Amino acid sequence: MHVAVKKGNPGMRVSGKRLSAASLAGFLWLPLVGGAEAQVNVTTYHYDNLRTGWNQAETTLTQSNVGGGSFGLLATNASLDGQIDAQPLIVANETINGSQHNVVYVVTENNTVYALDASSGEVLLHRGLGKPVNTENFFYCNVDGNTVGIDSTPVIDPSSGLLYVIAYDWEKNAAVYRLHELSPTTLKDAVAPVMISASGTLTNGGTYQFDATASRQRPALLLSNNTVYAGFGSWCDADANESRGWVLGWQTGTLAPLASNKLSNTRAASKNNYFLTAVWMSGYGLAASTSGSVYFVTGNSDYSGKSYNKVTNISESAAEMSADLSTMESLFTPGDHASLDEDDGDFGAGGLMLLPPQQGDYPDLAAAAGKDGNLHLLDADQLKTKFGSYQINGCWCGPSYFEGSDGAGRIVTSGGTTLGVWKLETKKKPMLRMEYQWNGIANGQSPGFFTSVSSNGTNSGSAVIWAVGRPTSNDDPTVDLYAINADTGKLLFSGAAGQWPNTSGNANIVPVVANGLVYVASDQMLTIFGPGGARQAKLPKIAAAAPLPLAPGHHEIFGTVERMNGSTITIIKRDGTPLLLDVSGAMQNFRYAAAEVGHALVARGTYDKSGVFHADVAFHAKDHPTLWPADR
């Protein structure tokens, strides 16, 4: 049997707790000269390659001082040049322009990399990595702003210090992805960036080429095995006849691609000519074990529900790949995968988290949930072994993990608007027991949100769960930071932390805690919280970008699906009036995501003389009309 995380694997000790080598990857404690407090570096998404989201070396922030009235907003930089979909990264004691700083690295959808002072938010360096892609150039996906540039969270190599980032560039009237290896102190390329390309063999012997136009690089980058890994999905299921999921890898230092790659769907044909099987996970990162295996979750495929195959199309599945991407090592596919495909029920809307080694007969565990809200507790050594499923509400999200003062492991879930803490019991068959729920996270967008946890080891009174909500209205697209007592579920703090004017696209914001400060990156803004800050602070207003122009004679409308009959759909508009849609054109051109009664859609097209709306594009929209842009 392949062992994902070996029990008893030696690792660093902090506050008396042994940490597995996997949990340390991308997350370092740096002792300073003169006996000062150790500094924490956050060099990868969700703190570590397991994706636990747990900073267990936070010695400043506690339940008492976060909830005692002295915690609040310290600094704001609202001059960044675009929407920030990526999590900030933090490195202590970098020398930039001749001065030493703790640095927070932030990237934007305008293809800009920023190095900011981690205390003040002041810009120390910034660099553009090419012209970002204007979304009107080639696709019709309403979940992003007007431009797409750096969409995923970069990763920093703790050994070399180099920063790896993927930019989406518009070059010679075409979209291309480029992988960069940057110096963190100058933001210059250490080696020439590489244009991303790949090919895979289909079941009929044909060759499928990586298509940058049909591929979205959303999941956070993973650094493991001296390799940078990236996952790719689709744009709102657009170009479903072309788009297929990928996991690709490149060697650090040279950026040479791996000899093997993973194409998630190699079928040559499917009933409706839909392929997909995206790797997107709402931005959650690919995970890695100590043995080097790479883990991810896939989304939906053909809406016939009949295209899944455990070898040729691993839709709606959690997968474990070998480090060189040559071998599928284990796979978990829910029993209702066919209905998930039929209903666009993306298991892959959420990410997969590996747990640190546990006591008992099954030390290596994994947890993952998606749109249907079922959190699956799995054996990470053999994913097909499921220990249980737990309903957490719809999850465009990902879990976190921490250990309480009793030493027991706990999983933090974030489905719907509800934060849940589940105690892990491992004496016999592993299982989860709900400790508490807190249903108070503001969210008008797709269900779910992201969390992180800070504590001083397992010291009593130190564990705090952090979360950022999603906007509830176009009129006030504020996102709030929440701090929750991890032991009791009591709210310690909440306050405005940024804005997200593009309410059609989920705010997949991960709060980052390091060295006594909390960082929240949103649209054009970074906010920094800590002791001594303003408890309630008014943030500068961020203006929403003007919508991209429509073709002459075309319109854009929003509504909730009332009835469906093949390609004919009746929606109820925001004013309560019905409208008949013909979506056959959108289907034929693969500009259609399967609609569902009771849920919202956005359509673009033209009216005929009888008042029927003929849609060229029909995709999902947010279910709350307060988040719909004005019809036009």
Image: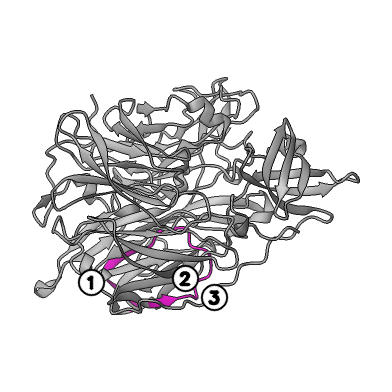
User: Is residue 156 shown to the viewer in this render?
Assistant: no
Q: Indicate the position of residue 562 as horizontal and vertical percent values.
A: 69, 40
Q: Secondary structure at mark 2?
A: loop
Residue linked to disc 2: 525
Closer mark to the observer between disc 2 and disc 1: 1
Q: Is residue 78 magenta?
A: yes
Bin the neighbour count of mark 1 within 10 Å (Cα to Cα): few under 14, some 14-19, many 20 and up: some
In the image, is residue 122 above or below residue 491?
A: below
Q: Nearer the viewer, residue 73 or 348?
A: 73
Checking the image for residue 267, the label placed there is: none
Per the rendered image, the range of residues in magenta is 75-97
Q: Residues within 10 Å of mark 3 (few under 14, many from 20)?
A: few
Nearest to the eye among marks 3 and 2: give it.
Answer: 3
> Which of the two labelled residues, at mark 3 and mark 2, occupies the earlier sequence position?
2
Image x and y of residue 402, in percent: 23, 50
Q: Which residue is mark 1?
A: 65
Measure how far apart labels 3 and 2 are at the Cα level. Answer: 10 Å
**At x 22% / y 32%, what residue is drawn?**
430
Depicted 295 relative to depicted 187: above or below: above
User: Which amino acid type is shown beneath numbered disc 3?
Assistant: Lys
Label 1 sits on a secondary structure element that is helix
Depth check, front residue: 169 or 265: 265
Q: Which residue is mark 3?
A: 541
Q: Earlier in the sequence, mark 1 or mark 3?
A: 1
Tell me if 584 is positioned left or right of 375 in this view: right
Residue sitting at 24 percent across and 36 percent down?
291
Assess whether residue 386 is covered by the magenta stretch.
Answer: no
